[in-house]
Image (tube, grey):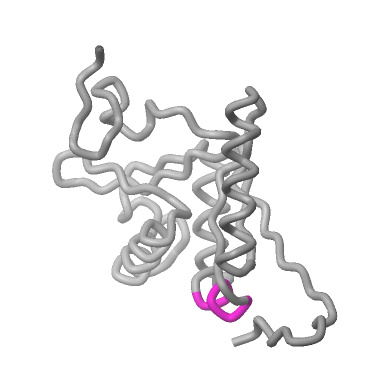
Amino acid sequence: MTNSIDNGWPDKYSDPRDRPYPALLRVTVESFETMQEDTLDAVEKIADGESQPALVSFATVGNLRKILTNRRIELLQYLIDIDGAAESITAVANELERGYRTVHDDVSLLADHGLLLIIDEGKSKRPYVPYERIHLYVELAGLSAGESSALA
């Protein structure tokens, strides 16, 4: 049996870059109930051998827009363009011609919401996007009787 480290991953996956990730990250806006149903469906599909995208969901369009600003989307796109990993936050800030502090804050926020990972290498923190693509799914539809607007 393989020993696990504190985060639940086997030792061979102690470096997040070695972990298996799907090629696609799907970012959605949906209720907790819908997200729960989608998660249970995905678990069944995975058990049947079907691959599934990674999923990050926001409760409202407003929540998604607070996190995925144009500058943060630019940062994610840059990381995807360089195959996911940068040398450091400083290198990203220099490449994007932005201040270190704002890029650091953006990287931390995106990591807190599961949109990227931060790899600690000595004194350097490397932002890392393990996905080849990120799809944003925001559905706008008329409200059914008894529903309230998801815009906040």
As drawn, the residue found furthest toward the left would be 122
As drawn, the residue found furthest toward the right would be 142
Front residue of this view, candidates 8 and 101: 8
Image quadrant occupied by the C terminus: bottom right
Front residue of this view, candidates 24 and 100: 24
As drawn, the residue found furthest toward the top would be 1
What predominant SS class does the magenta segment belong to?
helix
Left or right: residue 60 compared with residue 112: right
Quadrant hosting residue 143:
bottom right
Q: How many marks?
A: 0
Residue 26 in the image, given as x and y percentages of width and height: 62, 51
Left or right: residue 52 compared with residue 128: right
What residue appears at the point 69 percent right and 87 percent down from the top-left corner?
Answer: 148
Magenta residues, start to end:
61-66
Front residue of this view, candidates 92 and 54: 54
Residue 145 in the image, given as x and y percentages of width and height: 81, 86
7 in relation to 47, above or below: below
Residue 149 in the image, given as x and y percentages of width and height: 69, 86
What residue appears at the point 50 percent right and 33 percent down from the top-left corner?
Answer: 21
Image quadrant occupied by the N terminus: top left
Q: Is residue 65 magenta?
A: yes
Left or right: residue 36 compared with residue 13: right
What residue appears at the point 65 percent right and 33 percent down from the top-left corner?
Answer: 45
What residue appears at the point 44 percent right and 54 percent down from the top-left corner?
Answer: 114
Q: Is residue 120 magenta?
A: no
Front residue of this view, candidates 104 and 13: 13
Left or right: residue 30 compared with residue 121: right
Residue 9 in the image, given as x and y percentages of width and height: 30, 31
